[in-house]
Structures are given as structure tokens and as C-alpha cells.
Image: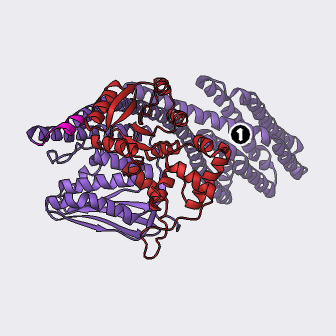
Chain colours: A red, B purple
Amino acid sequence: MMQAGGSGKRQARVLIVDDHPMVLDAAKNALLAAQVAESVDCVNTLQQARDLLGRDSGFALIVLDLSLADASRLEGLLALREDHPDVPVLIFSGDESPGTIANAFEYSARGYVPKSQHVTVLVNAARTVLAGGTYIPMHALRTLGAEITAPAPQANDARPAIPSLTARQTDVYRLLLQGMPNKVIAARLDMSVHTVKAHVSALFGTLQVHNRAQAVLRGRQYGLI
Amino acid sequence: MSAAAALFATARRADVLAEIERESMSIRCRQSIQSLPSMAVVLTITGALLWGTVDSARLLGWVGACFAMTALRAGVCALILPRLASVSREQLTGYERWLASTTIANTLAMGSGVWWVAAIGSIEVQYFVTLTTCLYSVGSLVNASTNAPIFIAGVAANLGQTIAFWALHGLDGIKIAIPLVVIALLLVAFGRANARAFAESVRMRYQNLDLVAELSHEKKAVEHALSIAQEASQSKSRFLAAASHDLRQPLHALRLQVGAIALGAQDGPVRKSVDRTLEMLESLDDLFRNMLDLSRFDAGALKPRLQAFAIAELFSHLEGEFRLLAEAKGLRFESRPVDARVQTDLLLLERLLRNLLANAIRYTAAGSVTLAARVQDGSVAVSVADTGPGIPPEQRERIFQEFVQIRPGAEGGVGLGLAIVRRIDALLDLGLRLVSETGRGSEFSVRVKQASAA
């Protein structure tokens, strides 16, 4: 699933983090061949990625493997998202289970591409995320989508009405749809992480969803993204 | 049966005989000791009742001899009983001799009463003594009946004397002797039957013990074999998991590299070749993925993700995927969904149905492939039916094994599809069923739990 939105940088700098050198090199070539990226940097560990991002703020996208030697699964993702909230993360992993994918979005990933997918999927997902969109793999979309009931459509209107949210909830939702983790939302809106969590959980209740990925799906149903 | 086993069986039979002997002696000894007080009472009463009707010295002699013999037997028994459990078979035979001789002595003493007490008394006394002897045979000697020879010898020693006494008393005596003979014969028959039943019950107990021992031995052997098989299966799974995972990384890299070439290639023969290469790599990756998943199913590493969803939504998705494939082969594709929601793992059920549909289309030359659902007692039965060649009964188990194809050479597939179907069926408890008729087609069906109304 792809969503275009915002104005993406056509020739961007991309950082790929993967502990398999062969995969790194191949992904780099694919992104360059598709002209998604102007340049691609490759690192093997989370620490190298953090060092590089600390020195250089010019990256437009991080492509991240989940199985790194120095990061336990999604912790690496959350660390990168909190330290560099303006650089979106696209997960590129061999793990295809919907549970892992839902968790990745819980930790504020902006996209998820299973490694078994065709090269064009990686390319298009990278383009989508660079353009400000979100990419959720089809099979995960189906299991996540089946759990939330479609909102009742309005008469004579294709789009369902957005449920009434408080001003604060709307602010939180907007940042959540941009893929911001709670800590970043807290800093941006000048509130505590605890308060953000309370807003998010109230928001989920109003939207009748169970997780961030479903909240993103709802946002699409309402035409918010 | 091997020679050693035969030897063992013979030894076992001898053991059982010894145990029957031991058990029988134990019962007889205990009863002899226990019956000593009641015998004393009975003999005292007998003596008192006969007192004054016969010669006192003879009466005392008889009653005293009876009591002395009873006491002697009880004494011998009291000596034997505590040693019984630990003695050898040879010693057992010696003990049996002691027990037999005291028992015979006892019965001889009892039976002799007719000769030297009753013989001098009135006819009533004779009847009374005869009755006492009979009662003794029936009531007390029965204790010995678990050992037939001693019992019969006892009956003969006891009743035999009485019978002989009456037989020597003319026609009237014979009238008494005949029913006594009948009683003696009945007692003998009873004693033999009782001894047999007793031996049988001991033998059965030993057979049961043997059986229990044998079963526990076999159980251990089976458990051992099972653990070896499980270990082998797990190491196979570990190997497959490691191999598939490590092979998949370079394969993913390879697909990306070839994909990068395809992205930059112009339309033409090179582009066509690159695209074909990509397709082949994709099939190869699929194969590795299936192998990896098989080992993950076997290792219990795949956890179902249960959720409620509409069966119609799943059907329309599968129809979108398979209708064109079926029609490209000239087959009709029919989808008959039902308006129901089910509760299971969506992706795993979809994968199961996808594998069944792919097989149905692959092996059906003409006719139709039908995906159908119907509500049935709180669950939804989902079936995939084809008009293909059918599966012969003897193949119906085999087709669910890995890498088994009963019609090799068919386009595509390596025989992992149904192996995965079987594992998903086991994981989600779908009660997979196969109905097939050779030449007519096959129908695979599963039952999915209906979701409670949302």
C-alpha cells in the first residue's frame, strides 16, 4: 500500500543499516539504479548509524534491518526515531510476521518491506516514505484492516465523518500520523510522555483501533493522509 | 521366541508354581492357627455332649488326641509361617511335608472317633460322631482345599474311616455309608475345583505382574525410540532453519542486484532474460521460505494470530488471485462464499487455501475448481474441490508428506504445499478432511470456528 503525500525530495541521501554486507550492497545498488537516492551510505551496526547521524544531518531516509548485532529488535528503531525524529525509518527485514510489522509501527516506523518482496516494492516504499507517506505491506494491511471495522460512510459522501477529537488529541494524532514516537510528540507539544500516552490511548478508543498502524489506516479512511 | 526367552519362560513357569505353593501354604498355615481356639471349643462341646453316654476314658482319649493333633499342626504352622516368604523351593517342599503329615494325623485322629468312641455307644452316639466327622470335613478341612492332594488325602483319612465303619454294619450301615461316600466325592470334586481356581488366580496375578513389567519395558523402549526420532526431527528442523536462513540472505541480495539491473535495463532480449531470472529467483526464495516455515512449524515457533474476519473478504481476495490462473488453463473457477465471520489466523488460513487452490488448478486438466463455504453447527466449513484425477486411497496419507508428489512432472511445485497445509491444519485445529474419487476429483475441507457476533 502506498500513500503519496507532502513534497518529497527527489534526489535524497539514504542511510542503510544492515549486518549482511551482500544485502547492503545490493539494496544500495537497487536504490541508486531506481534513482530514488542521490547517494547511499551503508553501515553494519546501530552504533555506526548513530555516530554517522550525529555527525551528519543530511539524511532523508534510514533503511533499517531489524536483526542487528548491537540492537535488540525494535529498540534500535525507537532509539533512532527519538534521536532523529525528522529522519523517517523504513524497515527492511526478513521477518514477515504481521505481529512484528504491527510492532514496528508501534515503535514509529514509517514503512516496512519484507526482504522477500520484489525489488520494486523496496524502491516504491522508499519513494513513498521519502514523499511523507507510510508504507504497510499488503498482507499486514489485511490482518490489521480486518480487525478494525470500517466507519459508517456518510450519505452522499465518500468519506466518513471524522470522530470529534479534542484539540490536543488532534495535535497528537497529526504527529502520530507523521510517524513520531511519543517522546518526540511530548517534546513538540510541550507535555509529558505520560500525558502523550494518555492522549494516544484515548485517541485509540475514539478511533476504535488497537495500535498505531491501525490508527494510520483510520487516518487514511478519514482522508487525513 | 529365542532360546534365552524360552529358558526365561520356563524359569518363570517354575517360579509361578512355587509361588502358588507358597501362597497356598501361607493361607493354610494362617487358617490352622486361627482355627485352634474354635476347634478347642468344638471339641469341648462334643466331649460335654457325649459325656456319660460312652466310656469317659475313650472319650477323653479321642477328644484329647484330636486337640493334640490340632495343636501340633497349629504349632508347626506357627513355625512355618514367618519363614515362608524367604525360603527356597526345596525348603518349601520340606515344609509342605510337615504340614501334610500333621494335617493327615489330625484328620486320622478325628475320623478314628467312630471306631473307639461311637462303636461302643448307642446308635445316637454313632450318628452324632459321624455328624461331627462330616462337619469337620466340610467345615475345617476345607481350609486345606487350596492344595488338592492333601485335601483329598485328608477327606479320605477322615470320612474314609467313618464310611468303612458304617459299611461294616450291615444293610442299615450301608444306607448311611452311601450318602457319606457321596459327600466325600462332592468334597473331592469341590477341593479340586477350588485348588484349580486358586492356582489360576495366583497365576493370573503373576501374569498381570508380568504384563505390567513387560508393558513398562515396552513403554520405555517406545519412549526411547520416540526421543531419538524427536531428536532427529528437531536436528533436521534446526538444519533446515539454519540452512534456509543463511541461504536466504545471499538470495535476497541476489534478487536485489538482479532487480537493480532490471531497473536500468532497456526493453529487449536482455530485459526479458533479467525478468525471467528474477522470476526464477523468486521461486527459489519461495522454496526456501516454505522449507524454513516447515521447520518453524515443527519447532512450534509459529504462533497463530487469531482474529475475527469475514469469510467473504478472504474469498474475494483468493478469487482475485486464482480466477485468472484457472481460466488461463481453461478451467471454471467458482467462489461460493457465505455471509459469516470466522475466528482464526487469517494469513495461515489463506495460505492453506492458497496451497489447496494452487494444487487443484495444477492437477486439474478440465472442468472446474470450486472454493466454497457453508455454515454448519456453529462453524464454517470451507472446501476446495476440483474435477481432477483424484487421489487413490493408498496415497491419501503420503501426499501430506514433504517432497512427495504422486504425479511428478506436473508444472511447478516441489511437494511442500500439502506438507504446509497439514501443519497449518494441526496448528489451527481445522479438522482437515479429504474426499476423493479416482477419475472424478478431490475435495479438501476444513472447519473454522465461527466468530461470536461483534
Prevailing SS of the magenta stretch: helix
Give the camera-side residue of A153 and B180.
Answer: A153
Q: Residue at x 49, y 47 (%)?
A: A178
The residue labelled by disc 1 is B108
Q: Would you call the spot at circle 1 few (<14 residues within 10 Å), some (14-19), or many (20 or more)?
A: many
Q: Secondary structure at mark 1?
A: helix
Task: Using the rendered view, name the quadrant where residue B446 is placed.
Answer: bottom left
Chain letter of the residue beneath label 1 in the structure image: B
Query: In the image, is residue B223 above or below residue B134?
Result: above
Viewed as shown, does residue B213 lie left or right of A201?
left
Q: Is residue B444 visible?
A: no
In this orientation, does residue A180 appear? Answer: yes
Region in magenta: B260-267
Q: Is residue A88 above or below residue B358?
A: above
The kind of residue on which mark 1 rests is Leu
Name the residue nearer the viewer: A201 or A42.
A42
Horizontal and vertical percent position of residue B282: 24, 40
- Residue occupying the point 82% across, 51% down: B121
Tell me which corner region of the image, top left, top right, bottom left or bottom right, holds residue B361.
Answer: bottom left
